[in-house]
Image: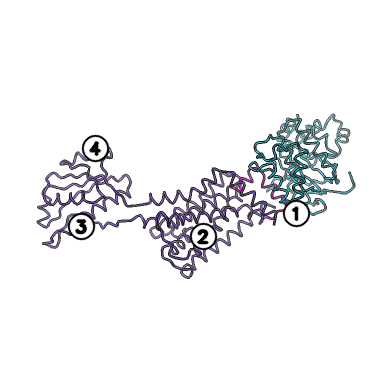
Chain colours: A purple, B cyan
């Protein structure tokens, strides 16, 4: 037992002495939460707006007032000619333009379809769509305020705006971020630390010693299990303090499921390191094997329901997919183990299979 | 040198696919002997050592190390041997003292024993002033001597040294060999691979491996006499020329210089 303790202490010394990596490991989850929290937001504010209104009338003025009233739009210019828009878009002076045709009020009054041209800078498609939706919402609101004499007042085909508040996007990303962080710490760091020992030749010294393979593995990965656990706690605390993401279910259950997922990630890390003896290859392997599927195929960012059928099948073997479902269930819906039995079982089986496979792959090297 | 056999190999073979790295080698090493394992790069020295230390399963043949069978009793072998690889086995980001302590713990030595032997090693090597220095900051020669001392820390019956002196200056090599002799006088059997042919003369007996086979074996003086050569270096080049794979011949001769 003292041999194992010595190994663990040595691994902690490696981690503590590698200051840069340590700082990255600690700061990364914290920074990621902030980055995702503030950047994965589809709502936009303070849109720079230009109005093209060649023949102002009562209706266009009323709409212009509505645009000016909210905090969303900031009217930069009111133009009379469409042609003046182009340079303003090009210089980024405006992000959005609303162009009224002449005789706007008259067309409206007659009950005809009054066209409004909404032009948006769509270099970033998501923000572009969001701006269009905001415009549609403003016009829609104006339309509803009008007396509806003919019953069919139409300005533009209305697009319902879903104002996506900060909270909703944070709620969505935090469970996925947990999986992401755990993959980096558990899978990537484990693979790196094991292959580093192969690169430097110290692994041979451990293998010819009386240490058992399981002792070497535990001694190498246990510290990363601990760091992974701290990472989970940090993400959860930060998410609830900064972004008020709720944890409606049991925290204990969430941490237990997190530990299960860490075991899966650690095993993948060990498997990757068994296949290579170079840190560079191990890094690529861990990224391809865990981080990429976690990002793309777990439902973390892209909804699984909208993927092609084949990709949906592939997500079934991505551990993060199950963990994200579990974490969302516990955090957002507040459900207990009873509702997550299938997901937990799948994750447990994955952990078992991968642990056995990784321990075996490690022993095979002793041959 | 006693009559007791520390290492016994008979027909020991290892193949990797169609390639035979070690081809039916047979030899005995007596307890307390310094046995030199010579050969060009790729001659099969390291593969042979990996089989004897339990890192690699033999494809055929028999071998015992410290009386333990290499197929079935690798765990027992591991307790009785020390090992130092070409790339020495110390951790660069641990201090001298921490490295000694780690290996002491791995071999289940008590804290008191570890402390006592740490002092002994530090004073023997004159490294007291760097005991709390990270290993990557001390000179290569010191590292190598320290790595040997660490391999001997648990006082193994047999120590395997795989090209321990490569890349070291001649003075350090001499000091290194003094350490090897000390261990040997203390009763430890030493199996050392090298491609410095002058080091062959320091060994009690040597074997020269060519293309996975033992091409010559005996005391340095015996070998020089029976093959009618001036030095082991000359014999080595002669044998390496006959290597059907010939790949190692030039390299071996060059390394011997």
Same subunit: marks 3 and 2: yes
Q: What's the chain of the residue with tag 1?
A: B
Q: Chain of mark 2?
A: A
Q: Which residue is mark 1?
A: B74
- Dot 3 or dot 4: first in sequence order is 4
- Which of the marked residues, 4 or 2, is nearer the chain's N terminus? 4
Residue A307 showing in the rendered view: no
Asked if badges 4 and 2 are on one and the same chain, I answer yes
Q: CA distance from mark 4 to mark 2?
A: 53 Å
Mark 3 or mark 2: whose residue is earlier in sequence? 3
Identify the mark at residue A258; answer none if there is no mark. Answer: 2
Q: CA distance from mark 1 to mark 3?
A: 81 Å
Closest to the observer, B10 or A326:
A326
| Image coords of residue A221 (percent x, y) | 60, 53
Residue furthest to the bottom in view is A338
Q: Which residue is mark 4?
A: A87
Pointer 1 and pointer 3: residues touching (CB < 8 Å)?
no
Give residue B104's position: percent from left, percent from top.
73, 49
Quarter assignment of residue A329:
bottom left
> Would you name the residue on which mark 3 appears?
A141
Mark closer to the observer (4, 2): 2
What segment carries the magenta color? A191-212
């Amino acid at each position: 037992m003292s041999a194992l303790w010595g190994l663990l202490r040595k691994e902690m010394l490696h981690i503590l002495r590698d200051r840069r990596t340590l700082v990255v490991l600690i700061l990364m989850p914290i920074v990621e939460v902030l980055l995702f929290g503030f950047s994965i937001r589809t709502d936009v504010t303070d849109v720079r707006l230009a109005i093209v209104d060649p023949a102002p009338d009562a209706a266009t003025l009323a709409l212009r007032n509505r645009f000016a009233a909210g905090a969303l739009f900031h009217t930069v210019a009111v133009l009379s000619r469409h042609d003046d828009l182009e340079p303003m878009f090009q210089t980024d002076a405006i992000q959005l333009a609303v162009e009224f045709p002449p005789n706007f009020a008259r067309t409206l009054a007659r009950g005809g379809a009054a066209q409004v041209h909404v032009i948006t800078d769509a270099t970033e498609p998501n923000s572009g769509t969001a701006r269009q939706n905001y415009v549609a919402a403003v016009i829609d609101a104006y339309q509803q305020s009008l007396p509806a004499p003919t019953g069919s007042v139409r300005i533009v085909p209305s697009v319902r705006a879903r104002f996506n508040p900060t909270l909703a996007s944070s709620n969505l990303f935090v469970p996925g971020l947990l999986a992401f962080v755990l993959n980096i710490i558990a899978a990537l760091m484990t693979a790196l630390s094991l292959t580093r020992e192969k690169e430097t030749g110290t692994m041979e010294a451990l293998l010819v010693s009386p240490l058992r393979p399981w002792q070497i593995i535990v001694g190498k990965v246990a510290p990363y299990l601990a760091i992974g656990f701290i990472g989970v706690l940090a993400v959860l605390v930060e998410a609830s303090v900064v972004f008020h993401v709720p944890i409606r279910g049991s925290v204990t259950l969430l941490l237990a499921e997190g530990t299960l997922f860490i075991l899966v990630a650690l095993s993948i890390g060990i498997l990757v390191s068994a296949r290579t003896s170079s840190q560079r290859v191990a890094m690529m392997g861990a990224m391809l094997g865990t981080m990429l599927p976690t990002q793309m195929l777990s439902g973390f960012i892209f909804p699984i329901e909208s993927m092609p059928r084949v990709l949906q099948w592939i997500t079934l073997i991505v551990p993060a997919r199950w963990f994200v479902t579990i974490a969302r269930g516990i955090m957002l819906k507040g459900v207990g183990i009873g509702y997550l039995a299938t997901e937990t079982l799948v994750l447990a089986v994955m952990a078992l299979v991968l642990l056995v496979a990784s321990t075996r792959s490690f022993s095979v090297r002793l041959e | 040198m006693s009559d007791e056999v520390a290492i016994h190999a008979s027909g020991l073979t290892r193949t990797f696919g169609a390639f035979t790295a070690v081809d039916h080698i047979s030899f005995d090493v007596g307890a307390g002997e310094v046995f030199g394992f010579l050969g060009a790069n790729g001659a099969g020295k390291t593969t042979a050592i990996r089989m004897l230390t339990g890192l690699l399963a033999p494809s055929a043949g028999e071998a015992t190390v410290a009386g333990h069978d290499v197929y079935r009793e690798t765990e027992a072998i591991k307790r009785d041997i020390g090992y130092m690889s070409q790339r020495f086995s110390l951790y660069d980001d641990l201090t001298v003292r921490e490295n000694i302590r780690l290996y002491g713990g791995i071999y289940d030595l008590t804290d008191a024993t570890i402390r006592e032997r740490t002092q002994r090693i530090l004073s023997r090597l004159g490294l007291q002033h760097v005991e709390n220095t990270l290993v990557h900051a001390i000179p290569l020669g010191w590292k190598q001597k320290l790595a040997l001392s660490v391999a001997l820390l648990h006082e193994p019956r047999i120590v395997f040294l795989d090209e321990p002196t490569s890349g070291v200056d001649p003075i350090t090599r001499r000091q290194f060999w003094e350490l090897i002799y000390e261990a040997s006088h203390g009763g430890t059997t030493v199996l050392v691979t090298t491609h410095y042919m002058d080091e062959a003369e320091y060994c009690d007996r040597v074997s020269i491996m060519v293309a996975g086979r033992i091409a010559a074996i005996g005391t340095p003086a015996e070998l020089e006499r029976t093959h009618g050569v001036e030095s082991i270096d000359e014999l080595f080049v002669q044998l390496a020329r006959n290597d059907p794979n010939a790949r190692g011949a030039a390299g071996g001769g060059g390394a011997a210089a």
